[in-house]
Amino acid sequence: MGKDVIIACDFASAKQTFDFLDQFTDKKPFVKIGMELFYAEGPQIVREIKRRGHRIFLDLKLHDIPNTVKKAMAVLRDLDVDICNLHAAGTIPMMKAALEGLTRPDGTRPLLIAVTQLTSTDQATMERDLLIERPIDEVVMHYAKNARDAGLDGVVCSPLEAQKVHAVCGADFLTVTPGVRFADGDVGDQKRVMTPAQAKEIGSDYIVVGRPITAAEDPVAAYERCVREFVG
Ligand code: C5P
């Protein structure tokens, strides 16, 4: 898989999602389905988007005991998505169990990536609520290394961390980065942002872009601009 733009389909219903996706008649974009849409519509929404020819990143961020995650991943593997994820905080045994569950009898499986520390968690919150006192950058890199050691394919990280993740975990370890905005666009609630061109420059493998595309007046044009700037 090469560099690509993944559209975050943060919609509340199947209708809104298909109204949005119906606008794309040429190229079928890679889409991300998150908890809101999945919990509202169930696995059928995944099957339908797949049937329409889209690649899918199913962003459900699993985190539980290894046996439970393994069994849940075994269900997800039959949805035939392209990327799944989990929380690296679930530890290496959980990540290894997830990979086992995700692997089909013929040895194929969706890519599996890990969330390190959520970008909503800052140093102060991590120290106060989680009693983790190391610098947050060190924690993020440690979780990324754990994910790599468990056999995962990459991490979700801020575009600002992508370069370092590649330096620490290898160039082939995927970095999937949200927090992307056009140079002339609204930043919204994202605190640390990069343009698609900057994300390309620092070596992100995939960018996850939501509102700059979904809330644009012309979503197809915004998507195409994003692809032009990021993939070239
Ligand atoms: O609309 P926007 O481009 O901000 O959407 C970014 C997407 O990436 C959302 O689905 C958001 O939940 C997700 N995300 C994020 N930051 C993270 C992890 C995921 O923005 N650290």
Image: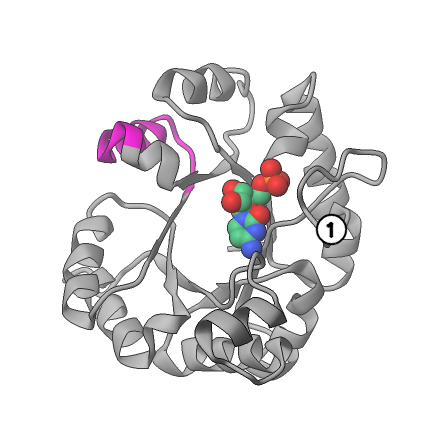
Seen at 56% across and 79% down, the residue is 141
Seen at 18% across and 65% down, the residue is 70
Tell which of 210 and 80 is nearer to you: 210
Answer above or below: position of 211 versus 129.
Answer: above
Seen at 56% across and 22% down, the residue is 26
Answer above or below: position of 77 versus 23.
Answer: below
| Left or right of residue 222, residue 147 in this image | left
Which residue is under mark 1?
193
Quarter residue 34 falls in:
top left
- Where is the C terminus found, in terms of image quarters? top right
Seen at 22% across and 63% down, the residue is 103
Q: Position of residue 136 (x, y in %)?
A: 60, 76
The stretch in magenta equals 40-56
Q: Is residue 155 visible?
A: yes
| Left or right of residue 152, residue 175 in this image | right
| Left or right of residue 218, residue 150 in this image | left
* Dot 1 alpha-carbon crowd within 10 angstroms: few under 14, some 14 to 19, many 20 or more: some
| Left or right of residue 143, residue 189 in this image | right
Q: Position of residue 107 (x, y in %)?
A: 22, 65
Q: Is mark 1 within 8 Å of ligand 1?
A: no
Q: Amino acid at mark 1?
A: Val
Tell which of 89 and 69 is nearer to you: 89
